[in-house]
Amino acid sequence: MAKKPENLSFEESLGELERIVADLEQGDISLDDALKQFERGINLVRNSQAKLEQAQQKVAILLKQDENAPLSPYAVEGE
């Protein structure tokens, strides 16, 4: 049984969303299964958006604690 979207990490949600999109793009599934996958995808997106908003709020709170903290560009490893 698949985990509930709220119990998945952000990264797990993205991985599952990618799989769902790939399955739907292939078009080899029945309409009922496609609708179930679509519904699951919508739930994953909503929970992922909520997690992102929570992270943004936490960052904003942390930055407000030290208004003099210097900001620096974010660099992704490997760039």
Image (tube, rainbow, N blue to C red):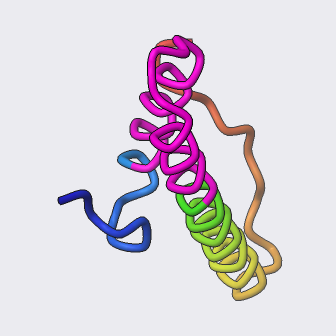
Q: Does the magenta stretch include residue 54?
A: no
Task: State the predominant SS element of the stretch in magenta.
Answer: helix
x 35%, y 69%: residue: 4
Whole-percent x and y of residue 3?
27, 64
Which quarter of the rendered picture does the C terminus lie within? top right
Q: Nearer the viewer, residue 67 or 74?
A: 74
Q: Does the magenta stretch include residue 27?
A: yes
User: On the picture, is 1 further left or further right than 7?
Assistant: left
Q: In the picture, residue 24 is in which quadrant?
A: top right
User: On the picture, is 67 further left or further right than 40?
Assistant: right
Looking at the image, is 68 positioned above or below residue 42?
below
Whole-percent x and y of residue 19?
42, 28
Whole-percent x and y of residue 45?
62, 55
x 70%, y 88%: residue: 65
Looking at the image, is 67 positioned above or below residue 78?
below
Q: In the picture, residue 42 is in which quadrant?
A: bottom right
Q: Nearer the viewer, residue 75 or 21?
A: 21
Looking at the image, is 73 positioned above or below residue 25?
below
x 45%, y 24%: residue: 29
- Residue range in magenta is 13-42
Whole-percent x and y of residue 33?
45, 40
Q: Which of 47 and 42 is in front in this view?
A: 42
